[in-house]
Every structure is written in C-alpha cells, then in structure tokens.
Image (cartoon, rainbow, N blue to C red):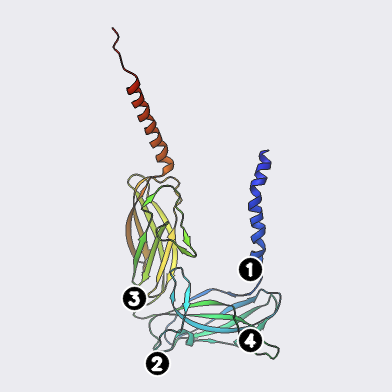
Amino acid sequence: MRGFLKIIKSLPLAFAVLLFLPVFVLAQQSGIQISPVTYNFELNPGETQKSKIIISNLNDTAIDYVMEKENFTSVSEEGAPSFSAGDLKEGVTTLADWISFDGPTEGKLLPKQEKEINFTISIPEGAEPGGHYAAVFVKQIKKTEEGKTELGVSSRVGTLILVSVPGTTNKSAEIVEFKAPKLLLKGPVECKKDGDKIIAGSCFTMKVRNNGTVHFDSKGTVEIKPLIGRTSVIDLGTHTILPHNIRSFGAGWNKKYPFGYYRLKAQATDGDGNPITATAVMWAIPLIIVLPILATLIIIFVVVRYVKKNFKLVAKK
C-alpha cells in the first residue's frame, strides 16, 4: 500500500518532466550559437589583438547569417547589456570602430555546421585610458530566391568584448544599498524574485556602484555574527561591473533554525581589490521554536490559575 502511494505521489513530477523535456530539447537543438560569450583584454595604444569566435548552426536546415558589431556602455543591475550608439564627440572612435573582421561578414551555415570567424582589435594611438566595450554579433537572416535580404525580425547572439586601455584610471566603488530581512520567523532564507530581479531584502541583497573609469570583478560576501555562537559567511558571488554602472548581488542562508540578534556586515571589492563594507542588524525568532514555548507557558499559566481558584491548602490539625 505504501509503495502504491509513493507511485501516485510521483506522478505529477513525472508528468512535469515529460511536459518540459521536449521544450528543453527543442531549445538546445535549434537556432544559432556563438562561443565564447565574453572576451576580456588589456591592450595598450597602438597594440593589436587577433581573436576568433565559433558560430554553430543547431538547425536541421541551412541558415544565412551576417556579422555585426555594436558598442555598449550600460548594463542592467542583473548583468544584461544595453546596446546603443551613445553620445560621441566628433572625431572620436569607439571599440566597435577598432574591431575588423578578417573575412566575409556574410555567409551560409549548413545544418549542424560550425565556422570560425576571425577578427582583429586595433587600438589607435592616443586611445583614452579606461574601459571600452562592444559586442560581436552573428545574426540569422532570411534571403529571397534572388539573394536579397528580407526585412523582418531577426534573431542574433553575441560575444561581449571588454577592453581595458592602461593609463591613469580610477577603480573606486561603493556599496549603495545593503538590505536583509529585519525579522526572520523561519529558516532557511531564500531569495524571492520579481521576474529576473531579486526582491531587495527578501534575502541578503547588495548593490555595488563602479565609480571608476574601467571595469573590474567585484566579489561579494555577507558576514552574519550572532551574540553567542559561530559566525557565518555567505558568498554573494563575483560580478563584473562597468564604469558608472550598478550591479546587484544576492544570496540566501541555509541555516534551518536561526535565533536571536545578529550583526551583519556586507563586503565587496573595488577594482584594486580593496574591501568596501556596509552594516545592518537582524532579529530571528523562528515560530517553530517560539510557538511551542509560548503554548507551554500558556498551559502552565492556565493550570496554575485553575489550581489556585479551585483548590485551597488546609493545614492538618
């Protein structure tokens, strides 16, 4: 009987796997793919850098493609770049201008075919020190029988190119927000999301702003220190932050029964590896512990009151 109940309970999970499995397989076996997803270079003025990307056709049919390049200067707090030409002064070139393809920018990929695309980054003399950012895209296009490109919505994937030009640069940063639950009624702590964004304060969240002129990787942690007991450290991960951009960090806490008063210290690193910190406090009163104690105290109070009201101690003569 118990074995039969286990089978019945597992049916919803099995149906869910069967429902989503075809979608996952289709997503992996269709479209166009590019690798790697990111390049990070430090190049001096006048220096060139040759590199390559691999594009793959995951379809069972041939596709036409075109190579593109585009600058970006801003990234969402979740790490998604926003591509735009930006405001440029006359005569000023950008990283997209410094990237050139070493071969044709259009072509055809046969079913399941991979192709190597070579490109060169040429840093001009007098290039401004700091960070410069662009992406190399491969875009799937549709062509007519005459070979002309059809207008319409086209899908594209890209490789991010991050270039740092040495010189006088600023690598400062600051924590602009640190939030944590003020009162925990249960554990463990899990992050809640609104779409792709972690809801600030639903777990241990932090926002770090790059005030400098070049990108860097910032490592985030949160130290949780109780009044009595062992200190815990939560890893918030490492994220690349572009100049004048803010990056969100967030993580939960796997402690099952937190209890008492905690002092919290969030820490991130700037572009030179120096720590920057922010502090907060948190109370934890888990209901699974408090309710039984409270219920016990109420029962004791009721019993004592009942005894006092209905029984009297009489001295024996």
Neighbour tally class for label 3: few under 14, some 14-19, many 20 plus, Cα within 10 Å: some
Residue 6 percent coordinates (x, y)? 65, 44
Instruction: Return the disc, 2 or 1, that comes first in the chain's sequence.
Output: 1
On residue 68, the disc is none
Q: Nearer the viewer, mark 2 or mark 1?
A: 1
Where is mark 1, residue-wise?
A: 27
Instruction: Return the disc, 4 or 3, that comes first in the chain's sequence.
Output: 4
Q: Nearer the viewer, residue 204 or 232?
A: 204
- How far apart, in angstroms, are the residues tagged by discs 1 and 3? 42 Å
Instruction: Return the disc, 4 or 2, that comes first in the chain's sequence.
Output: 2
On residue 150, the disc is 4
Picture quarter with the C terminus:
top left
Where is mark 3, residue-wise?
A: 170
Instruction: Return the disc, 4 or 1, that comes first in the chain's sequence.
Output: 1
On residue 90, the disc is 2
- How far apart, in angstroms, are the residues tagged by discs 4 and 3? 46 Å
